[in-house]
Image (cartoon, rainbow, N blue to C red):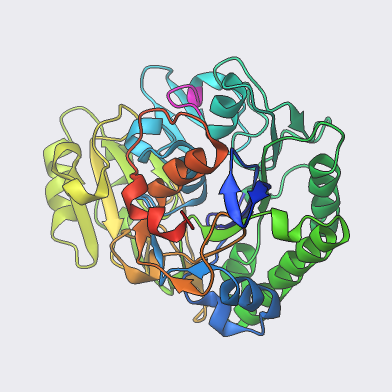
Amino acid sequence: MSSAAIFVVFFSTSLISGVVSGPQSILLISLDGFRWDFASKADTPNMDFLAKTGVTVPYVRSVFPTVTYPGHYSIVTGLYPESHGIVSNSMYDPVFKAKFGGANTDPRWWNSAEPIWVTNQHQKGRSAVLYWPGYNVKIRGMYPIFREYSPSSNVDLHNKTGRVLPFEKRVKKIMEWLTAPNPPNFLAVYFEEPDEACHRHGMGGVSKAVHRVDEIIGLFIERLKHHQLLNKVNLIITSDHGMASCNKFIDIDKIVHPSSFDFWDSWFNILIAPKPGKEEKVYKSLKNVPHLHVYRKKEVPVDLHFTNNRRISPLVIVPSEGWVVSSRNGRYVKHLPDTGLGHGFSCKCKSMSTAFIARGPAFKKHYIGKPFDSVSLYPLMCKILGIKPLQNNGTLTDTQDLLRN
């Protein structure tokens, strides 16, 4: 699965004299890699329609680390990665003495938090999830009632392993669930673009990929119209993280010998554990390297919310925006294209922020709200579903001005 994403949420509702009444249904769509300003990079008539007839905000602040799995799980739990336990796309657990990769469906990696689709079913709802991280995991003893299951469904979309449905067939599957005799009231689906195009082609690939995902949104709008659901359904578009120009790298093997530490993660941010007796030497060697922000675990800035989890290594390395860390012991980068785009940088970087558009009977029309944190989408969705949220790091105060009532 790719490390960036946009989400679209649809809500069906009952209307009384134009006033929203009762719990509503949600369809959450992830368009991976959709930065806050990407809609301006291409012709996007469908997103423009939704924005003009609904609500939008300038941007949504991502969680750290700004990569796919942590960002997606924060959206559906309302928790920072240090709390929900998915601290990167790949990670090491010192208690399990095991490594995690994107295709891992062992519940023990996921059970530190409960995603909204499980909570919804605990509270008598019905959930449908397609390719969202964790969709095929029996989290806290429960799968989504509706899910795409096949021998190839245990896939890591980021690494393109296994076979997955083409985009149009994903729309078809979601609409089949949404129009079933006893449909789910919460639906979520993931699309891996424009993230993959960003990594492969840089800014040169953004326009085509953004136009492509806008066509998919248009297909949803068309199908909803056909089933007379467009004005009974609320839609949200947002993302797990943004993108930044990324064409410089630092080979840390030239600074500290690879035998002096273990990699716990080697995505864009770096989690390393120095060997016994080597921590001070490794720390001091990397601390003064330009464009590397190196922290002992307890020294990670508070506003990154990345300290209180055993899967966070003793040393955390956050490169400056645009820089990639390379090592033969982890993720080795020989070179980067001049046009490359990447992510994983501090969530305080504007480039790591994401887009947000919402439309439907639950939302105001022609309204521009204020920026908010991605963890605050969770209490907003619980409010619309009419379910009691679990403890989370978000706040409805940040998003309730978007609602009609």
Question: Along the line of sight, which residue is nearer the eye, 321 or 137?
Answer: 137
Residue 163 appears in the figure: no
Residue 201, percent from left and from top: 61, 75
40 horizontally vs 326: left or right: right
What residue is rendered at 84% in x and 60% in y? 223
Question: Along the line of sight, which residue is nearer the eye, 298 or 137?
Answer: 137
- Residue 147, image quadrant: top right
Tag count in the figure?
A: 0
Q: Is residue 110 magenta?
A: yes
- Residue 313, image quadrant: top left
What residue is rendered at 57% in x and 53% in y? 19
Question: Along the line of sight, which residue is nearer the eye, 156 or 176?
Answer: 176
Instruction: Check the image and name the residue furthest to the top.
Output: 141
Residue 159, percent from left and from top: 65, 49
Residue 26 appears in the figure: yes
What residue is rendered at 34% in x and 43% in y? 394
> Please, is residue 131 above or below residue 405 in the view?
above
Residue 326, percent from left and from top: 40, 57
Residue 395, percent from left and from top: 33, 45
Magenta highlight range:
109-114
304 horizontally vs 24: left or right: left
Question: Along the line of sight, which residue is nearer the eye, 192 or 183?
Answer: 183
What residue is rendered at 69% in x and 42% in y? 131
249 horizontally vs 19: left or right: left
182 horizontally vs 116: left or right: right
Q: Is residue 330 magenta?
A: no
The chief SS type of the magenta part is loop
> Please, is residue 352 above or below residue 65 in the view?
below
- Residue 309, image quadrant: top left
